[in-house]
C-alpha cells in the first residue's frame, strides 16, 4: 500500500510540472503586458518625476545640528528633479566647495601660525563661523526643497502660461506662495555663494601673505566674512 501511495505522489508531482511548463508560455506575455503598463504609467508622470515615495518622505533638518552628510543625504534624491534639481546640485556643490576651502585655508594656517595664538584665532574663528553658516543655510535649503511640490508647480505654471488661471483663485495664490519659496531658495544660495567667494579671497590672501607679508587687505576680507556670518545680516533679508 505504501508503494502505491509513493507512486501516486510521484505522478501528481510530474503532472504539476507539466501543467507549469505548459502554462509558462501563456504567463510570460501576461507578465510582459503588466510590466509595459507599469512603465507607461511611470512615463506619463514625466521624465523628471522623483522615484515613487521619495517625495513623500520628509527628514526635517535642525540647522544647528545638521552636518554636511545629513544635508547631502536629504537633497541627493532631488538632483534630477525638473524644478528642484538646480537647487539640490547647488547645495551639494556648496558643501563640497566649503570642505575644499576648509582644507586649503587650514593647510596655510598650520604652515604659517601656531595654534592657540591670537593670530591663529584671528583667522580660524571667522573661517569656522563661515563654514558653519554655509551648512546651516544648506540645511534650510534642504528643508525648503523637501516641502516643495514640483509637479504641482509645473502644472500651475503651464496653466499660467496658457492664460488659464482665474484671477483671485486659490491656484493663483498657490503659485504665488510657491514662487515665494523659490525666491527664498535663491537668496539662500546667494548667501552661500557670497560666503564661498570671501573664503576664496581669504585663502588667496593667506597664500600671498606667506610669501610677501601682511597688509590691511586681509583684515578687510575677515571683516566681510564676519559681516556675512552675522545673524542680523541674514534675518534682515
Image (cartoon, helix red, strand yellow):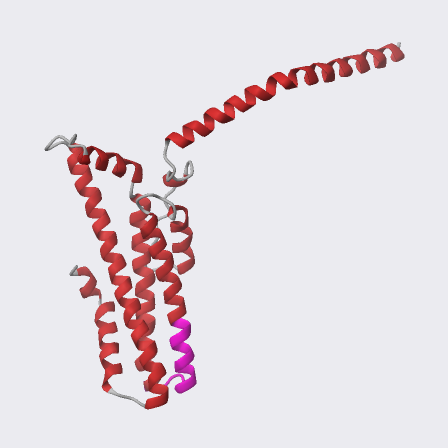
Residue 91: % across, % down? 34, 56
Q: Name the residue at 27% across, 37% down.
A: 154
Check the image and name the residue furthest to the front: 162
Q: Is residue 12 left or right of residue 2?
A: left
Query: Which image quarter holds the C terminus?
Result: bottom left
Residue 114 in sight: no
Q: Specify the quadrant that holds the N terminus.
A: top right
In the rendered image, the vertical position of residue 163 relative to residue 137, given as above or below = above
Q: Is residue 117 magenta?
A: yes
43 left or right, relative to 3: left
Magenta residues span 102-118
What percent of the width, then of the height, locates residue 30? 55, 19
Q: Quadrant of residue 122?
A: bottom left
Count the labels in the image.
Answer: 0
Residue in the foreground of this view, choosing between 87 and 66: 87
Q: Position of residue 206 (x, y in %)?
A: 34, 82
Q: Is residue 130 left or right of residue 234?
A: right
Res. 63 image quadrant: bottom left
Which residue is at 37% across, 71% downward? Answer: 101
Can see residue 131?
yes
Position of residue 172 measured from the top left corner of the image (x, y, whole percent): 15, 36
Q: Residue at x 16, y 33 (%)?
A: 170
Q: Is residue 109 magenta?
A: yes
Is residue 66 positioned above or below 195 on the image? above
Vertical arrangement, residue 152 with respect to residue 91, above or below: above
Q: Is residue 113 above or below residue 189?
A: below
Q: Is residue 191 left or right of residue 204?
A: left
Classified by dominant secondary structure, the portion drawn in magenta counts as helix
Amino acid at each position: 500500500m505504501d508503494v502505491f501511495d509513493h507512486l501516486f505522489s510521484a505522478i501528481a508531482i510530474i503532472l504539476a510540472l507539466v501543467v507549469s511548463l505548459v502554462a509558462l508560455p501563456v504567463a510570460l506575455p501576461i507578465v510582459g503586458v503588466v510590466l509595459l503598463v507599469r512603465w507607461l504609467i511611470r512615463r506619463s508622470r514625466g521624465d523628471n518625476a522623483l522615484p515613487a515615495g521619495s517625495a513623500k518622505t520628509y527628514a526635517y533638518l535642525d540647522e544647528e545640528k545638521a552636518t554636511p552628510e545629513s544635508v547631502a543625504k536629504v537633497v541627493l534624491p532631488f538632483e534630477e528633479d525638473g524644478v528642484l534639481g538646480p537647487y539640490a546640485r547647488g547645495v551639494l556643490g556648496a558643501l563640497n566647495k566649503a570642505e575644499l576651502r576648509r582644507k586649503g585655508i587650514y593647510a596655510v594656517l598650520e604652515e604659517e601660525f601656531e595654534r592657540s595664538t591670537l593670530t591663529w584665532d584671528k583667522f580660524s574663528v571667522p573661517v569656522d563661523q563661515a563654514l558653519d553658516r554655509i551648512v546651516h543655510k544648506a540645511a534650510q535649503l534642504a528643508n525648503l526643497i523637501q516641502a516643495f511640490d514640483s509637479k504641482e508647480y509645473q502644472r500651475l505654471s503651464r496653466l499660467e502660461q496658457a492664460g488659464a488661471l482665474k484671477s483671485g483663485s486659490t491656484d493663483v495664490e498657490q503659485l504665488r506662495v510657491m514662487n515665494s519659496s523659490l525666491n527664498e531658495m535663491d537668496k539662500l544660495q546667494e548667501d552661500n555663494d557670497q560666503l564661498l567667494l570671501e573664503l576664496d579671497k581669504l585663502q588667496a590672501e593667506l597664500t600671498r601673505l606667506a610669501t610677501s607679508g601682511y597688509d590691511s587687505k586681509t583684515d578687510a576680507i575677515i571683516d566681510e566674512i564676519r559681516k556675512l556670518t552675522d545673524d542680523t545680516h541674514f534675518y534682515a533679508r
